[in-house]
Amino acid sequence: MKNLKKQLLLVLFVFGFFLVEAQEKPLNLNKPEREAWFTDLGFGMFIHWSFDVQLGMVISHSMVGASDDYLDRYVNELPKTFDPIRFDAKEWAKAAKLAGMKYVVFTTKHHNGFCMYDTGTTDFGIMNTPYRKDITKQIVDAFREEGLAIGLYYSPDDFYFLYKQDTLISRERPEALASGNEALNSYVKEQVKELMSNYGKIDILFFDGMEQYAKTELAKLSWKIDPDVVVTRGAIETPEQETPNTAIPSPWEACYTFGDQWQYRPTNENYKSANDVIRKLIEIRAKGGNFLLNFGPDELGRFPQEQKGKLNEISLWMFINQEAFEDTVPFKVTNESNIWFLKKRNENTVYAFLIEDNWDLGERKQFNINVLKAIENIKISVLGQNSKVLEYNPDVDPKPTVKNTGDGIEISVMRAQRIYNDRKWPNPIVVKLENVEF
């Protein structure tokens, strides 16, 4: 009898485990055609920003574990000095478009509960600061004017709501979560209704927060309001600060900070180089994902030069190589060593991204690609250059060549376009191969 009881308990335990797992699995009611549309966007701008940027601190999280005195000053005093009078949403939208980004995701409300939009649910927001202007509306209008898709980030975690409710601010206690706090559950649903109703058509929603229950409930509400909206976090894979080791089925979206922190930090910050970002973009797209790269305005709303300068380098690279990201899909292999691939949709055209650390102007290099085969009418070109002339060197022939080898093809490529005055260019060269067999 004891053994039978043990076996029953084991069965119940296993059943309960799988029941929890099933409950935690994200619900995905995104339309397949809308997910395909989203995947084609490829590259997006994430913007994290809240009133606590004034102190250069982590966005929101300092409220967890904070003293009563700290919380009182944080929620009652700090908003009174938030006045980002230098914010220009059009500047951000134009910079994103120039960099080849196709969508934006803006933090309408982070975990602290501070609303960066005009809401009727609380006074804790941008409309009750000296600034008194709807930041979200400015973002939506500016990016929409540039033809970029509109995405809104929203967190159902709300530390301010818990503070006013006299509930201990935490991340995982039942009373701090929507599933265990009915008032919070109703509150966040009302806010999502506002966001989905007051800013025209919203293309993408990113639901953050600890609890899958809340994200699923908000996703269901959003799909009910607009069945065409694409829910990313809360419905699909959105790895944060990492890229899968291998390609995974689309759609998915890798979210990265430009520095170490999501919100702008004026000191002790470590930014990625533009070259790092470009390489991540290539890898993520080759693996079938979207790349959502984060930026953050400062306390006055300015585009920090540390971010803007590096984005300008990315824009330059994209201006040269943007064709490789237009109507392309992952190839049958992601890469061969430091050569990454994308394929033109429904065509026998492959783009090979040559990742080289040092490549001098006028230097010719050879590369072997095993997965491709040259046929009689194959064409090879280097994006951005005509490969007919090398500046100041009329006797040099910079034309790229391709030939079959026993194991694939060999391409010979010269870097023949001056990008910088010093003739140096640290970023990948992209070779277009048309009419190839694979």
Image: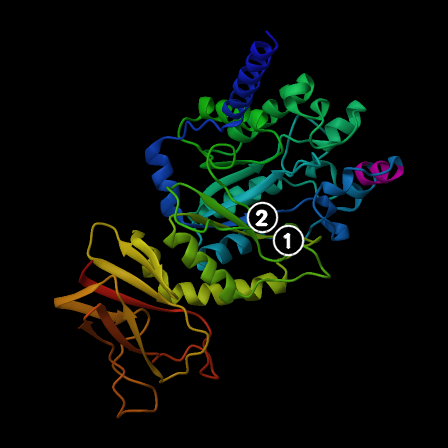
Q: Nearer the viewer, residue 94 or 291?
A: 291
Q: Seen from this angle, which residue lies furthest top? A: 1
In magenta segment, residue 392? no
In the rendered image, which residue does mark 1 sit on? 297
Q: Is residue 100 visible?
A: no
In the rendered image, which residue does mark 2 sit on? 47
Where residue 355 appears, as percent x and y from the top left, is 41, 69
Closer to the chain start, of discs 2 and 1, is: 2
Q: Quadrant of the N terminus?
A: top right
Where residue 262 appears, as percent x and y from the top left, is 63, 50
Span highlighted in magenta in the image: 69-75
Residue at 22 percent of width and 59 percent of height = 349
Q: Quadrant of the C terminus?
A: bottom left
> Alpha-carbon neighbours of circle 1 within 10 Å: few (<14), some, or many (≥20)?
many
Where residue 200 appears, as percent x and y from the top left, is 48, 33
Label 2 amino acid?
A: Ile
Secondary structure beneath dot 1 equals loop
Q: Nearer the viewer, residue 413 or 325?
A: 413
